Amino acid sequence: MLGLKYVIAPKNKNLLDATISGKSMSTSDSAPNFPEGIKENSDNFSIYKDKGALPIVFKTENTAKNMVINYNPVANPFYRLNSLFLQGFGISNMYQEMKSDLIKQNEVSKEYAIDVVSDGNVYCYLPIDQNVVTESSIKVSVNGKHVTTMFGENVWGENGIVYLGSYKKGTKIHVNYESKDIQSINPVFAVEHGGNLLELNKFKKGITDIKVNGNLISFDKKTEDTNLAISVPYDSAWTAEINGKPVQTYKTLGGLLGIRVIEKGKVNLKYNVPGLKVSIIISTISVILLCLCLVLKRNI
């Protein structure tokens, strides 16, 4: 939502196999789950654009600067995402957890039945310890149709959120998991509220002509009293100005760069590399001294 704008997925089987064999979470299906995505094809890759992602610069609520996000690989991500949407954008209950019934189980598989409680995208979360699942894959199927394979053979993987599809309220779906370590799999299911997701569009408005050039970010701001977030990590080396006047920066959304701009106009942000000027001065003096030493050595 905040930073993943595009996905490049390999079409070539050798490239896909190389991706899966890497030491990270992977899937056997290269197509990402962007229901509203725009796809561009090449011989070796498909490029997907996430139309739902926020731009590099977007508006936030004032409470976004109070957010604290602590990484925990076994924490419920839907709870944390709801907190982010509420504090960052004033949107409540973006993800609604759903009750699931374990209806079938054996040594290598589990099957759950879920009644979808509202229209929207349905996801499951697999809170799996890296130290438990290391040498077996997890195959996920919905209503008998294969969705994805996670944690490929002999691959270390971290926890994952799996997109199960878009469903209408009242739909009953059956989700099956196959794995040698099936006993350690206890998924959490949630549906993403489509209507609430559309509310993010208002946080994109009023920001135009966004340009990124090296250490410079600029854009035009069409609204007045606004808290803005920029999809780059907060660093005190960033400076900002609106219409040539300095603007204070701060940390927002748990770690991104934030600024408060109370007028319309042109906003410029610049990253000033810490210690760069001092380094240039020291290097210049060093070169001068070296030249003097060489000249003196020749005259001796």
Image (cartoon, grey):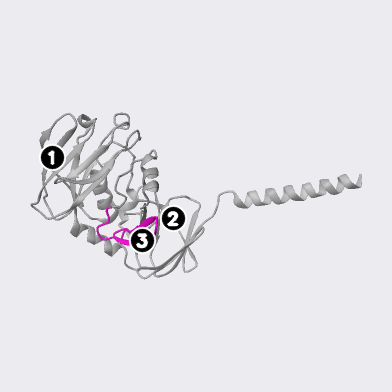
Task: Kindly identify the amino acid type of the residue bearing the numbered disc 2.
Answer: Thr
Compare marks 1 and 2 and give the one earlier in the sequence.
Answer: 1
Looking at the image, residue 215 sits to the left or right of residue 45; the answer is: right
Picture residue at 29% right of the left edge, 48% below the top: 29
Instruction: Write down the region rendered in magenta.
Output: 33-53
Q: Amino acid at mark 1?
A: Tyr
Mark nearer the N terminus (2 vs 3)? 3
Q: Position of residue 260 (x, y in %)?
A: 39, 60
Residue 108, how many percent across, how many down?
19, 31
Res. 112 mark: 1
In terms of depth relative to the viewer, which is nearer, 125 or 207? 125
Q: Residue at point 69% right, 49% down? A: 283
- Bin the neighbour count of mark 2 within 10 Å (Cα to Cα): few under 14, some 14-19, many 20 and up: many
User: Does 185 lie within the magenta span?
Assistant: no
Placement of the N terminus among the 4 image quadrants: bottom left
| Rendering quarter of residue 157 | top left
- Could you say which disc has been placed on residue 63 in the image? none
What kind of element bears circle 2? Answer: strand
Q: Determine crowd level at label 3: few under 14, some 14-19, many 20+ residues with C-alpha closer than 10 A.
A: few
| Mark 3–mark 1 distance (CA, rounded to whole Å) | 36 Å
The residue at which mark 3 appears reads as 41
